[in-house]
Image (cartoon, rainbow, N blue to C red):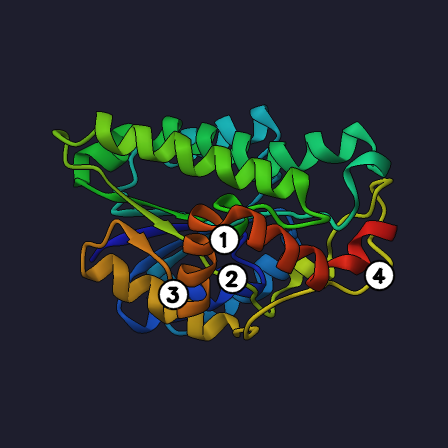
Amino acid sequence: MKTMLITGAASGLGWALARAAWARGWRLILVDRDGEALADKAARLAGVDTRRVRHFALDLTDDTARNELVAALRDEPLDALINNAGITHRSSVARTELAVFRRVMAVDWDAPVALTLALLPALRARRGTVINIGSMAGWMPVLGRAGYCSAKAALAQFFEVLRGELADEGVGVLMVYPSFLATPIERNALGFDGRPAAHARSSVGRVRDADWMAERVLDALAAGRRRLFPDRFTLFASLLWRLAPDLYHRLMRRRFAGELDH
């Protein structure tokens, strides 16, 4: 039985991925900072088969807690690691406190990089795959999301380099680039001062649900894909940014004008 570790597993896309992977027969290691919600979700699955699920509540940006997790998993096989846990903000660059940018970078770049490097021996042993939940914001600018765009762009570049360096060691990398999803990450977005953002998010294209996205991620993993652009809008927008960046900027400013006041 193959084993998958999912971060941010207590809600949103992480929980959808856990349910979908469970249905496909995976053994799961679930990680989230919300211990109460995580225990509840793990219990739902463990009620069916306790041998197939373990869970760990911790903040992955805490070096000590993350090292304790890695030590606890020292003897665990690992066929897939899904770096899903994330945070975003909705605030203009000039108004945003530097601590907000640092927090987004810590969760969205530092934590997945550190966890992946620590678990590389387990992934090498099983010729496993690292799946990173990136964003279209890692490929193109989005007003009001400078910190998030920066973190996801850094994530993409880091793991594309890692992919090349591990090409002969059997460790795969799947980069996932969703557009807008109906998940708690946006409902819990930070504002300019680190408190919850007070204004509604701007979006373009169709807002997809987490279950739809989870199935496509697991299908891409099963197929051995390296990158996943799950809908046509995401692919079109990435091409528009590269081929006609000035037009992209004009359209973005029109659609996301409301972000300029926050």
| Type of amino acid under label 1 | Met
**Mark 2 and mark 3 in contact (Cβ < 8 Å)?**
yes
The correct choice, above or below, for 15 with respect to 74 in the image is below
Foreground pick, 210 / 73 = 210
Q: Residue at x 58, y 24 (%)?
A: 64
Seen as rendered, the residue at the extreme left is: 168
- Mark 4 sits on what residue? 199
The image position of residue 17, as x and y in percent, is: 42, 64
| Type of amino acid under label 4 | His
Q: Which mark is residue 230?
A: 3
| Type of amino acid under label 2 | Ser
Give the mark count: 4
Tell me the quarter of the picture where residue 2 sits: bottom left
Q: Residue at x 38, y 65 (%)?
A: 230
Query: What's the distance in space between the residues labelled 2 and 1, CA to CA?
Result: 6 Å
Q: Which callout, 3 or 1, points at the residue further toward the start of the chain?
A: 1
Tell me the quarter of the picture where residue 193 sits: top right
The image position of residue 45, as x and y in percent, is: 44, 69
Is residue 75 toward the left or the right of residue 126 in the image?
right
Q: Quadrant of the N terminus?
A: bottom left
Query: What's the distance in space between the residues labelled 4 and 3, CA to CA?
Result: 27 Å
- Mark 1 sits on what residue? 136
- Mark 2 sits on what residue? 179
The correct choice, above or below, for 148 with respect to 209 in the image is above
Query: What's the distance in space between the residues labelled 3 and 2, CA to CA?
Result: 8 Å
Q: Identify the element where label 2 is drawn.
A: loop
**Mark 1 and mark 2 in contact (Cβ < 8 Å)?**
yes
| Type of amino acid under label 3 | Pro
Query: What's the distance in space between the residues labelled 3 and 1, CA to CA?
Result: 10 Å
Tell me the quarter of the picture where residue 147 sits: top right
